Amino acid sequence: MKFLCVDCDHVMAFAERQLPGDGTMAAVFACEACGREIAMLTNPMETNLVSGLGVEVGGRTVPEQPLELVRGTVETGAPDAFADEEPSLTPGTVAWSEEATARLSRVPSFVRGMVKRIYGEWAVERGIAEITPEVMDRARTDLGLEGM
Amino acid sequence: MSRRIRTYRDVADPASEDIVAQVSEQRERLERRLADVGATIAVASGKGGVGKSAVVANLAAALADRGLSVGAVDGDLNGPALARMLGASGPLRVDEEGAHPADGVAGVRAISMDLLLEADAPLEWRGSEEGVGVAREALETGALREFLADVVWGPLDALVLDLPPGTDALARTLGLIPDLDLLLLVTTPSSAARGVVARSVAAARRAEVGMVALVANMTEYRCPSCGASEPLYPDAAVEPLAESSGLDVWAEIPFEPALASATDAGRPWVLEAPSAPAARALAALAERVVETT
């Protein structure tokens, strides 16, 4: 799929992806010649079609996680289905503030471990020592994880 | 004069498409994960209610009981029962390698949606209120791909897949495992089941699956008191299907009510009552699988 800026005859580049958490998706593309931006909006069915392929529009922002599709898309998952181990690079290098831990606890437990792993890896890559709600906000925007 | 807008082919190089690269990476990941699997065996039925999952659980247990390392994938996402039949339970440990399968009887490693869903809950996908039916097939194929590619199987002698009823499931599986080593088609001797499994035979032929064989389940009922046996279906005969399809019947498994109750409770019949006629038939099936794959 490509978006062409008709005025500039220039292929628009992927700029940003947002998942507001209601099953829909917004993917922003921008024309590097004139700066025009457009957003492609998908309904839940279209979003699921893309999820089923296991691909991400605009490219992956984080490595594919184990059972990512199942954990991110199944509505009726058991809270205790998974026992997630912390990534080996995270312990001792990234701490979770009380507020961030409280916020993480609101993520459904079926997918919580995976989300925690993604935040942890994102923080480690940037040398961030403590994950706070502000860090989570930055990571969510950066990774397109608004649904998490 | 209307303007000409450049086409996709004008502006894109499909080989360098990011989506193509992501799909290629998925395929490579699946191939890497299955590289240490000796034989891939799919068990399908065409029609539901023929006891396919019980055959899978007992086949996997019989293979493992022979000292083989065995994995079991429950491809029946909407009617999952394989983990329970194998006595496997969660939670699944997840680490950087992937999700680790649940250990079942005789060391069979299992993955099944029944390890992941809330008790008694159906499989529901997010967004189901807005026409998820169209996307359901894509999601189910993706979930099966993850069961194969994201689970830390380790080296296996055999990976057994329990496919849901229907010929579409076979096509979906072959899309993920084109080099399937063996397809077992389970049928009862009833004319209705035979008719449906004939469609699966045709689908397997079209897909050029290497080896296909029939398993006739619930062929007869044996009286536990006097030992006399009677066909369970009035028109019982699997030979016509074998003859018309040119496939061998690798097992004829008699109906034993205790097989179902024990297997449903996580005690496969081949381990629970190895001398029972049905258990002997299933053990012989495992023997045939080992000899052939």
Image (tube, rainbow, N blue to C red):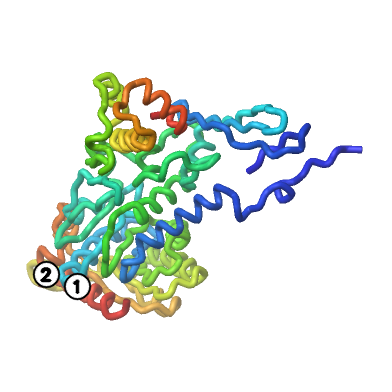
Residue indicated by mark 1: B283
Count of marks placed on residues = 2
Q: Is residue B134 visible?
A: no
- The image position of residue B192, as x and y in percent, is 40, 62
Q: Marks 2 and 1: same chain?
A: yes
Residue indicated by mark 2: B274
* A140 is higher (above) or lower (below) than B201: above
Marked residue chain, label 2: B
Of all residues, the one furthest to the left in this rendering is: B225
Residue type beneath disc 1: Ala
- The image position of residue B87, as x and y in percent, is 16, 53
Of all residues, the one furthest to the right in this rendering is: B1
For the residues labelled 2 and 1, say whether their Cβ atoms are less than 8 Å apart.
Answer: yes
Seen at 50% across and 29% down, the residue is A18
Marked residue chain, label 1: B
- The image position of residue B144, as x and y in percent, is 38, 52
